[in-house]
Image (cartoon, coloured by chain):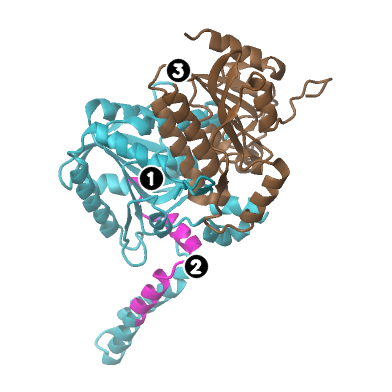
Amino acid sequence: MILDFERPIKDFEERIAELRRLAGSSQELREEISRLEDALGAAKKRIYSNLSPYQRVQVARHPERPNFRAYRDALTDDFYELSGDRLFGDDPAVRGGFARLRHGGHNVVLIGHDKGTDVKSRVKGNFGMAHPEGYRKVKRLYELAARLGMPTVVLVDTPGAFAGREAEERGQAWAISADLMALATIPVPVISVIIGEGCSGGALAMCAADYVGMLENSYLSVIAPEACASIIFRDAGRAAEAAEALKLTARDMKTHGIVDEVLPEPLGGAHNEPEAAVEAVGKSLNRVLSGLADTDPETLREVRYERYRRIGAYASENGLAGR
Amino acid sequence: MCPHCEFHYPLSAPERVRLLTDRGSFEERDEGMFAEDSLGFDDYGEKLERARKKTGLDDAALSGTGTIGGRRVALAVLDFRFIGGSMGSVVGEKVARTVELAGAEELPLVVVSASGGARMFEGVYSLMQMAKTSVALSRYVEGSWPYVSILTDPTFGGVTASFATAADVVIAEPGARIGFTGARVIEQTTRERLPEGFQTAEFQRDHGMVDRIVHRLTLKGDLERLLGFLQ
């Protein structure tokens, strides 16, 4: 899939490929190719370093963007999947289990939204929109990690918790709330990386963590820009304006002190060089896990409490104001 | 309340406080906290001004301590008239402070919700209030005092998905609409016709999510009974 704003880049690339085929030993064509390659490089830089917030949302949703499966496959030596919430069923929209990370050899509980890689797996995983049984599986894994003293790595990539009849019947809100309560107290390091979409409570249930990293073109928002636009402007087509207003980019999150780090993506976005993007996340995970390894559980809980307790922006008559 | 069908009309936060607490016992805390339009979001600043004028409140939550049947409790009440009772930084902070007050003074905690969810005009700050109220509650529930959450019409979104459902006892008013995603949005996304009574308090009780449905006129007495079981 080619995004609108990527068109000029794709045009260059196609032109170059075409000329390569024809070039043979023609010096003239080779010079033309090299000229086009320079132009391509410049176009990439110009386009990708000036993405609007909504363009970033589109990059975050790109079907070829590396998702949970890519990270699981490339970054672990072994992934021992655990299924089910022990109450109702297993939700393939989120997966989790024990994992040994290739970088640094850390044994962790690895959890993530699974958006799938083809039509069949995308539908099976409900496009990363979990039902209550998904969030209850997550809670089960948080608690297991806590008991076994294993650090927990969570990869966030969801358009939101699923909005549907059955999700409501089984207590979607209750399940998310229980995850937040569990996250607040588990005595092991919790490291979240937002690798794509981080939308609403369904994302927060998996990223109120000790360290939150965000890929450069991922987003975190209280509401999808389309839904926000249809409420505010009564027009979902004005999503670009809503995305602007919501300040949902990784850089905004860093500015507002919500995330610890913006993880750079290869030029052109993670979908252009998936291996490099995944590898970079693997390296940061190793660094962060090693950094948190010796923190004692009480300090972890204390610091996590303070971190989330203070977030907010308000003014107060007695002069005590939030940030 | 409608005298014929007993429909529970929305109640303002001050009315709710009067309904639940013993006369003259309520002491407000954390007055004078004001939301900031930190993102410069559309006409949020004007919305706040209008809501303040309309309700006489600083924001969508009123909090403090009071007695119910002679027993002192920490109490926070949301007001749906103030931008749909939505949770932004002020509501999140007030709820968190009430939780901490209850913990520090070893009081039962009562929170009455009426909210459309997170206040999207505050962007990610509103989302993070779910985490804020949850961390506060996670400490409170390590103690031995109960948290009673009362869900009134309507309670949705980030409020239901955080403090409003993380309670020891969940009470709902008859007919109150309670859920995560609103019925209209569900119908739009799934193209499914939702059954009669979907997301009502009774529906939530039948699905195991709510402990009791309590009529507004007997709510204070019901809380007095509940608190009477505690040391």
Q: Residue at x 70, y 41 (%)?
A: B55
Furthest residue in direction bottom, as rendered: A28
Front-most of A173 and B12?
B12
Report the magenta stretch's main SS: helix
Q: Which residue is mark 1?
A: A156
Helix, strand, or loop for circle 1?
strand
The image shows a total of numbered marks equal to 3
Helix, strand, or loop for circle 2?
helix
Q: Residue at x 48, y 38 (%)?
A: B130
Q: Colour of chain B?
A: brown
Front-most of B136 and A122?
B136
Q: Amino acid at mark 3?
A: Trp
Q: Cα distance, mark 2 to mark 1?
A: 25 Å
Numbered tag placed on residue A242 in the rendering: none
For residue B170, what is the image quadrant?
top right
Q: Cα distance, mark 1 to mark 3?
A: 35 Å
Q: Which residues are magenta?
A: A39-68
Q: Left or right: A233 with respect to A295?
A: right
Q: Left or right: B213 with respect to A46?
A: right
Chain in cyan, by letter, is A
Q: Do the CB atoms of the residues marked 3 and 2 lie less than 8 Å apart?
A: no
Q: Which residue is mark 3?
A: B145
Q: Amino acid at mark 2?
A: Asp
For residue A137, what is the image quadrant?
top left
Q: Cα distance, mark 3 to mark 2?
A: 57 Å
Q: Do the CB atoms of the residues marked 1 and 3 lie less than 8 Å apart?
A: no
Percent position of residue B181, x then y: 58, 37
* In this view, B204 is above or below B92: above
Label 2 vs label 1, nearer the camera: 1
Q: Which residue is mark 2?
A: A4
